[in-house]
Image: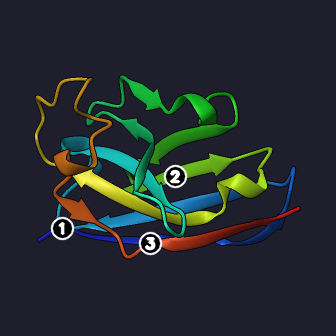
Amino acid sequence: QVQLVESGGGLVQAGGSLRLSCAASGRSFSSMNGGWFRQAPGKEREFVTAITWSGGSTYYADSMKGRFTISRDISKNTLYLQMNSLKPEDTAVYYCAADSDLITPPRAIKDRYQYDYWGQGTQVTVSS
């Protein structure tokens, strides 16, 4: 059974940075696509970014391009989300997710229903 545990959330001022971590157990990120999603109050969970199991491709939501960076450390089996130039509208609960389908097409990797495993979420609050 795969378990994902996020950490690194908190309160930051607009323009600041945070790095989220997602430690996986039960299966390696070298055999799972890894993604980050977020959910603000009253809104649906939305795609933020993803990295393929091979590490060869990354995907970003348009509003995060240039500000957020996904990475991973296979030796630690950990996924990261570096968030820079944070804005108040980035305030949300951020979730780590893993997709065990190694042939997920690019159009599906942004779909939250593609993901089998989820972390418990970590709160990110950006003050203005």
Q: Which mark is residue 108?
A: none
- Label 2 neighbourhood size at 10 Å, few (<14), some (14-19), many (20+)? many
Amino acid identity at mark 3:
Gly
Out of 108 and 33, give the one closest to the viewer: 108
Residue under numbered circle 1:
2
Is 14 placed above or below 125 here?
Answer: above
Out of 55 and 84, give the one closest to the viewer: 84
Residue under numbered circle 3:
121
Left or right: where does residue 123 sit relative to residue 78? right
- Taking the spot 21% from the left edge, 62% from the top edge, the residue there is 117
Among the two numbered marks 1 and 2 on one chain, the one whose residue lies closer to the N terminus? 1
Is 7 placed above or below 52 here?
Answer: below
Q: CA distance from mark 1 to mark 2?
A: 17 Å
Question: Please, what secondary structure does the residue beneath circle 1 have?
Answer: loop
- Taking the spot 61% from the left edge, 36% from the top edge, the residue there is 64
Amino acid identity at mark 1:
Val
- Taking the spot 19% from the left edge, 50% from the top edge, the residue there is 113
Rendering coords of residue 13 (x, y %): 87, 63
- Label 3 neighbourhood size at 10 Å, few (<14), some (14-19), many (20+)? many
Among the two numbered marks 3 and 2 on one chain, the one whose residue lies closer to the N terminus? 2
Instruction: Judge depth for marks 3 and 1 and give the one in front.
Output: 3
Q: CA distance from mark 3 to mark 2?
A: 13 Å
Tally the marks.
Answer: 3
Rendering coords of residue 87 (x, y %): 77, 51
- Label 1 neighbourhood size at 10 Å, few (<14), some (14-19), many (20+)? some
Q: Which mark is residue 80?
A: 2
Which part of the image, by quadrant, shows the C terminus? bottom right
Amino acid identity at mark 2:
Tyr
Residue at the front extreme of this rendering: 42
